[in-house]
Amino acid sequence: MTTKKPKNNILNFPSKISKLERQVEAILFAASEPLDEETIEKRIVTKTSLKKVLEKIQANYSTRGINLVCIRNKWAFRTADDLSKTMALQKTTQKKLSKATIETLAIIVYHQPVTRSEIEQIRGVAFGTNTLDILLELQWVRTAGRKDVPGKPIQYITTDNFLDHFNIQKLSDLPTIDELSAAGLIDSSSVNPNIFGTGKFFKEQTVKNKDTIYSDMDKTLDETQKTDK
């Protein structure tokens, strides 16, 4: 008859961690932002595949309170997803964004690149300059050149910091309005569906606006010529 060995409460951590793994772990832990592999390689000297080292560290931390995650080819330690409720107290102390700021961010996310006037056209109301300033200060949004239309307005797009903050791998992973509604996260009957557009809305509006602008110019020239006569 075999006897069962008594269970113990000792955690089984990896028996041995290489010097290289410890170096990479320390670099990532001390970093104030996600790091790409090239940045990490500049700080260590090795012929070993850094990708394999990172994946090994990721595996070692997969069942712990913090995980090593890779977002857009950049690596960083993050609180495990299943512990988000534990961190709820910390989240409640943060300043909430205004409705205008949230709507503006959503429009930029789903319509980028987008101009200020296009944002206001979708929302149906003008907004203060501080609304965009907040998103720029959070580094969730940045400028992306000027649109090739009369006036050359500045365009806005989201940043890697936006993806990192919301733990999104790529923009195509963002849910559609139907998916958000099905999950019970929004009431589609009370939400402007234009916010979750695909960009087609603006292409149509841009063509329409161009036609209006040029037709107005033609009208003004005609009136000027008549006055001169």
Image (tube, grey):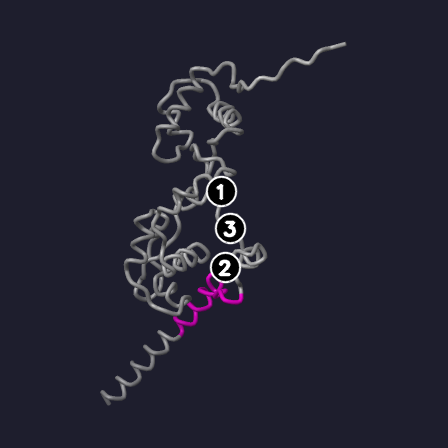
Alpha carbons under labels 2 and 3: distance apart? 12 Å
Given the current orientation, which residue lies at the most extreme left position? 228
Q: Position of residue 8 (x, y in %)?
A: 58, 17
Which mark is nearer the camera, 1 or 2? 1
- Pointer 2 or 3: first along the chain: 3
Residue 88: image quadrant is top left
The residue that disc 3 covers is: 174
The three-letter amino acid code for the residue at tag 1 is: Gln
Disc 2 target residue: 198
Q: Residue 169 got which mark? A: 1
Q: The residue tagged with tag 1: helix, strand or loop?
A: loop
Give the residue at the far bottom of this rendering.
229
- Is residue 197 shown left or right of residue 40? right
Residue extent of the magenta highlight: 189-211
Of labels 1 and 3, earlier in sequence is 1
Q: Position of residue 116 (x, y in %)?
A: 34, 62
Image height of 113 relative to 209, above or below: above
Q: At 44% across and 58% down in the image, what residue appears?
A: 111
* Residue 170 percent across, percent down from the top left: 49, 45
SS class, disc 2: loop
| Residue at the image point whose x is 34% and y is 34% from the top | 32
